[in-house]
Image: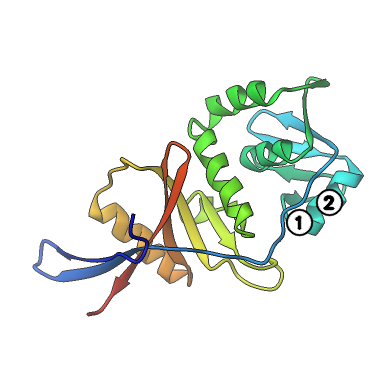
Amino acid sequence: ANTDLRVMVGIIDEEGDVTYYLAKFFEMRGTLEERKYSGKIVLMNDRCITWDEELMEQLRESHIGKDFGVYMQLSLTEASYLATMGATIVKNKRKASMKRFIEHARNIQPDIEDRLKAYTHLRKLKLLPKTGFKFGSHFRVYDNEPEKSHAPYLVHVVKSDYGATWAEISRAVRLAHSVKKEMVFCMIDDDKLKYIRLKRITP
């Protein structure tokens, strides 16, 4: 695909007003290096917890998870990524294989495998994804340490054959703009990932 391709779309609403959007393939880069992890993560149904002090320190250094002082909470996506990078997931005091963990997670988040693909790829780009639930997206994405900057991107993960109404897209783009972020769709076709940025423009 031509990554320099830009497409401008004009949408006419019920009152005859035109809203223009610019869509383009988008490349993001960050400054947050990947690393290996060690320690135990406990699976607690729809999220994970770690009390492992060594792992907690590693996570603090990487800005991953939610810190509650004596323990840290991780999303299913974060936990699955950490497991691929060396950490151990435990369920009912027994080590859970990646296959078993994904099977469990799929019952709660059917798209967990696509989320993991996107999360893993974003980390390879030295970006830091965190939940974007409050913004109606899968991830809010930082390109620097969260304490030093706001997340400049909202990333929503979709299949390459994803379909949406323009009303849904308009809502997503407007919300991203209202919180000073760019709306990016991560399109997954098997193991190929492409990022498309959509923004409202005034031609």
Considering every residue shown, the one lying at the far bottom of the view is 203
Residue at x 61% of width, y 23% of height: 104
Residue 30, given in percent of the width and then of the height, sits at: 62, 65
Residue at x 73% of width, y 30% of height: 43
Judged left or right of residue 39, residue 78 is: left
Considering every residue shown, the one lying at the far left of the view is 16
79 or 122: which is nearer to us? 122
Q: Quadrant of the N terminus?
A: bottom left
Amino acid on which the number 1 mark rests in the picture: Ser
How many marks are shown on the rendered structure? Answer: 2
9 or 124: which is nearer to us? 124
Vertical position of residue 110 compared to residue 120: above or below: above
Q: Are marks 1 and 2 in contact (CB under 8 Å)?
A: yes
Residue at x 55% of width, y 58% of height: 140
Indicate the quadrant where residue 148 lies.
Answer: bottom right
Q: Which residue does the numbered mark 1 point to in the structure image? A: 62
Residue 199, given in percent of the width and then of the height, sits at: 34, 68
